[in-house]
Each structure stands twice: as C-alpha cells, then as structure tokens.
Amino acid sequence: MQAVTIELSHVGVTYKSGQANSVSALGDVSLCIPQGDFVFLVGPTGAGKSTLLKLLYQDVRPTTGAITVGEFDLAHLRQREVPKLRRRMGIVLQDYGLLPQRTVWENIAFACQVLGQRRRDIRVRIPEVLDLVGMTHRCDAFPTELSGGEQQRVAIARALVNHPPLLLADEPTGNLDPETGAGVMQVLLEANRRGATVICATHDKTAVDRLRRRVVAVEKGQIARDEPEGMYGYEA
Ligand code: ADP
Ligand code: MG
C-alpha cells in the first residue's frame, strides 16, 4: 500500500452564499496525519468536521492555506486530476449511498469497473471485502432488503474494494443504533489494522472513549485539541 501523508498548513475555508453573505467554516487549521493513523474528528455540530473531510476529497477547495495528500497539492489541483486523487481514498458518508437497483455484489463491482479493473480481479477481490465487513451471506440482496447497519457495512466494503490507502468517514454510525454502530466501527478498525489511514468524524462518544485513538477536536473552525489516545470530551 502506497504511503499517503496528509498535511494541512494554515487552512481556511469561507463559504460564499449569495452576494454578501459568507460563512467562515474553518480558520487557520494546521494538521499532519501520517499513513496508518486512526483519527477521530470530534466537535459540536457546525464546528467544521465535514468541511475538513470535504477538503480532503476535494468537494471543497481551501480559501487560504496549503493542503497536500500524498503527492497531490490540493490548493492547485486541476479538475481533471480529482478522479486520480479520489482513487487513493474510500469515502463513507452517513447515508450509505448504495445504488438501489443493484445487488450488494453489483454495488461493489461497480466501484471496481469504474476504475477499469479486470473481471478476474474483481471476482477475487469482492469476496475478500464482503468477508471483511461480514456480509458474504447477503451478496445477492438488494439495499432495501438490508438494515441500516448492513447497508453501511456494504458501503464500507465498496469504499475498501480498490485498496485505498486512505478511508474517510463522515458520521458513518450517525443513523445506526449503538450495537450496529459498534460493528461498523470494528470494520473501520480492521481496515486500519490492514494499513489504511482512517479519518472518522463522529458523535459516537462511547466508541471514541472505548477505542482511545487519536482525537482531533474541531470547535468553531479551529483545532481545539489533538491528543494521541484521546477521549470524546463532550457530553453525549
Ligand atoms: P460539522 O460537520 O462539524 O457539523 P460543517 O463542516 O458541516 O460542520 O459546517 C461548518 C460551518 O460551515 C457551519 O457553520 C455550516 O453551517 C457552514 N457550511 C457548511 N457547508 C456550507 C455551505 N455549502 N454553504 C454555506 N455554509 C456552509
Ligand atoms: Mg458534519
């Protein structure tokens, strides 16, 4: 797995809405995340967690400052280079985003086909990721036949199928009950054990306090804490 170091240096994001209105979502954020880290992004709603993740997958561009993800300079990345950047990462959002007309297997296969992978390789790789997320027995099911937790595990399998060195997750357990959410967290941990950097924005106090990983707290667009074996630090 190729090492991808993430570095943000004095990054600010201002959203422009309308003619006169602008919202400062992040201001002067500096952060370094080496390959193999597991980072929980915590902080109140509206603090800037999603914006931080969106910067990394280039849904949002920095207004000020510099960001590098591996060899990519995100402040100057050309639009046509964005797919190349995204090939380095798996992205998992709160709403699983599976294609409703396709089975579990087809949903994952689609992510491989987009990258032009050979059918033979796809047939080998899909069972591996289905096993990783514990969904082998449901490979022929459609998303509507699955619980929320199962859908999210499939979404993670899809995010991991191309062996990305980086996994970005924005409140992946936000719609799940605690027990199901714990299963999803286990899958993120397993991906990290296999070498992927994981950055997970979450309000899951129980998981953060139990797992004691690196915690980066964002408050009002600033890094308020960055602790190696941190705690959630807010009321649940
Ligand atoms: P979090 O994920 O921590 O809840 P966000 O990154 O979503 O925070 O939002 C940070 C701030 O930026 C909030 O004040 C939010 O309202 C604002 N914001 C987010 N997205 C947009 C947007 N597309 N346009 C304008 N303001 C936005
Ligand atoms: Mg958010």
Image (cartoon, rainbow, N blue to C red):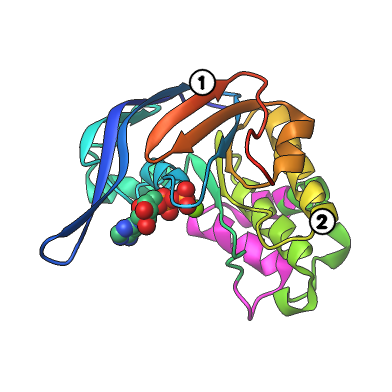
**Residue under circle 1?**
34
Q: Where ligand 1 lies, by quadrant?
A: bottom left
Q: Of the numbered discs in the image, which one, if any, rests on residue 156?
A: none
Instruction: Give the residue displayed 81% in from the left and 49% down from the top.
Output: 183
Instruction: Give the residue displayed 46% in from the left and 28% down from the top.
Output: 224
With respect to residue 33, does 174 lie above or below?
below
Q: Marks 1 and 2: which is nearer the front?
A: 2
Spatial distance from mark 1 to mark 2, Cα to Cα? 29 Å
Q: Is residue 59 visible?
A: no
With respect to residue 223, does 78 lie above or below?
below
Tag 2: residue type?
Thr
**Residue under circle 2?**
180
Residue 136, position as x, y percentages in the image = 85, 58
Tag 1: residue type?
Pro
Label 2 Cα neighbours within 10 Å, binned few <14 / some 14-19 / many ≥20: some
Residue 138, position as x, y percentages in the image = 84, 66
* Residue furthest front in the image: 235
Does the magenta run of residues contain 147? no
Residue 15, position as x, y percentages in the image = 25, 53
Tell me the magenta residue range: 99-125
With respect to residue 147, does 9 lie above or below?
above
Magenta stretch, main secondary structure, is helix
Q: Is residue 105 visible?
A: yes
Side (left or right) of 66 relative to 125: left
Side (left or right) of 204 relative to 78: right
Instruction: Give the residue displayed 61% in from the left and 46% down from the top.
Output: 202
